[in-house]
Image (cartoon, rainbow, N blue to C red):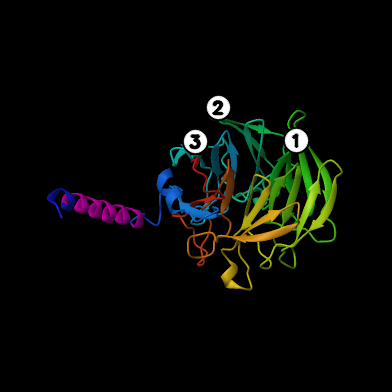
């Protein structure tokens, strides 16, 4: 073999070994878009770690405005907080924003977004019996808050959503320590709350979850005065009616997370499981077939309850909450991907 051929063969061998080593050295937690695509399983359905949430928060609430996530309130090692944090998925970073101008830190508030403004409603506070009636509106453009019409009575542990520019707060606990079953509707133009129908056939509940598909809300799980739940119901605000849908697999739970990506709803985590192996289970709901499909489990090792969950574009985000030992987990914030398309967004 000529000297030229030997040099060529050596170069090919070196390039092959180097390329293989590079492909096999992708870290378990990836941050760049290229590495994420290369490490993703076929068809998507995977999680990666993102920037940790700044504090060890339990029972916060969240909302999304103009492609950025917001996390408000909760408890930090037993103390309620009024902090508002903004998450920028492009920079993968958290920024502290203006806190509401009240002296009543709170946890377990409901939240929703109307016309580019975030709303926090109710919550558990340290005075007035622990039940807030307040509604506050956040404007991200001016980074300011203003108070709106109060609820008819205080409540916390409710779930919030929005349909056709109307905000909704469902279920929760009121000052009589009764778990409620009704939905309250907020009209931002009239600055007015009104009472809608009751969830049929069951007692009230708190720490339930909700997501919206095609202008209908899907509400389920939670705990009531005497039991925990795994049922799911479809609420249509146009008819003010309810239809029971397929139960969430894996048994009863409360303090779970939920969000919508595209035409599918997603629910996961929570606490109170008969089968410990399902505590991190993550499910997608298909409205057309009325079926649930198990997806990749929420990472973090131990089960995660009273966390926050929201979606931005084609990604879901889950973080904060409690761990197996019922202590805050300050280190867990994860992004869920449904696709491995070459044009991965942040």
Looking at the image, the residue that sits furthest to the front is 1
Question: Is residue 103 in view from this perspective?
Answer: yes
Q: Is residue 14 magenta?
A: yes
Q: Check whether the beta carbons of the residues at disc 3 and disc 1 lie within 8 A of each other.
A: no
Rendered view: 185 above or below 203: above
Q: Is residue 256 left or right of residue 149?
A: left
Q: Position of residue 12 (x, y in %)?
A: 25, 51
Q: Measure how far apart labels 2 and 3 are at the Cα level.
A: 11 Å
Closer to us: mark 2 or mark 1?
1
Mark 1, other Cα within 10 Å: few <14 / some 14–19 / many ≥20:
few
Q: Position of residue 11 (x, y in %)?
A: 21, 50
Q: Position of residue 134 (x, y in %)?
A: 67, 40
> Which contiguous range is marked in magenta?
7-24
Q: Measure how far apart labels 3 and 1 are at the Cα level.
A: 28 Å
Which quarter of the figure has residue 280? Answer: bottom right
Q: Which mark is residue 164?
A: 1
Rendered view: 100 above or below 234: above
Which residue is identified by label 3?
Answer: 97
Q: Who is closer to the viewer here, 172 or 341?
A: 341
What secondary structure is the stretch in magenta mostly built from?
helix
């Amino acid at each position: 073999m000529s000297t030229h051929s030997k040099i060529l063969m050596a170069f090919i061998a070196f390039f092959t070994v180097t390329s293989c080593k590079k492909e096999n050295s992708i870290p378990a937690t990836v941050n760049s878009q290229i590495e994420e695509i290369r490490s993703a399983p076929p068809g998507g359905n995977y999680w990666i770690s993102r920037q940790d949430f700044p504090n060890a928060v339990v029972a916060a609430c969240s909302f999304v405005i103009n492609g950025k996530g917001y996390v408000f309130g909760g408890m930090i090692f037993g103390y309620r907080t009024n902090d508002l944090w903004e998450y920028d998925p492009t920079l993968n970073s958290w920024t502290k924003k203006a806190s509401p101008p009240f002296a009543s830190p709170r946890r377990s508030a409901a939240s929703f977004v109307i016309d580019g403004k975030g709303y926090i409603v109710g919550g558990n506070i340290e005075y007035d019996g622990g039940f807030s009636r307040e509604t506050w509106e956040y404007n991200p453009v001016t980074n300011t808050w203003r108070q709106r019409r109060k609820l008819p009575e205080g409540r916390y542990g409710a779930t919030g959503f929005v349909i056709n520019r109307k905000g909704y707060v469902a279920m929760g606990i009121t000052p009589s320590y009764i778990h409620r079953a009704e939905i309250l509707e907020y009209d931002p133009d009239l600055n007015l709350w009104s009472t809608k129908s009751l969830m049929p056939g069951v007692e009230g509940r708190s720490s339930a979850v909700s997501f919206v598909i095609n202008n209908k809300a899907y509400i389920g799980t939670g705990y009531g005065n005497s039991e925990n739940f795994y049922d799911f119901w479809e609420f249509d605000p146009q008819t003010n009616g309810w239809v029971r849908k397929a139960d969430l697999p894996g048994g009863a739970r409360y303090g779970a997370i939920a969000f919508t990506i595209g035409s599918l709803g997603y629910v996961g985590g929570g606490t109170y499981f008969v089968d410990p192996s399902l505590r991190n289970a993550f499910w997608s709901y298909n409205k057309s077939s009325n079926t649930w499909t198990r997806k990749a489990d929420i990472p973090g090792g131990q089960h995660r309850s009273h966390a926050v969950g929201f979606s931005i574009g084609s990604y879901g985000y889950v973080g904060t909450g409690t761990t197996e030992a019922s202590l805050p987990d300050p280190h867990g914030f994860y992004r869920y991907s449904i696709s491995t398309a070459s044009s991965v967004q942040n």
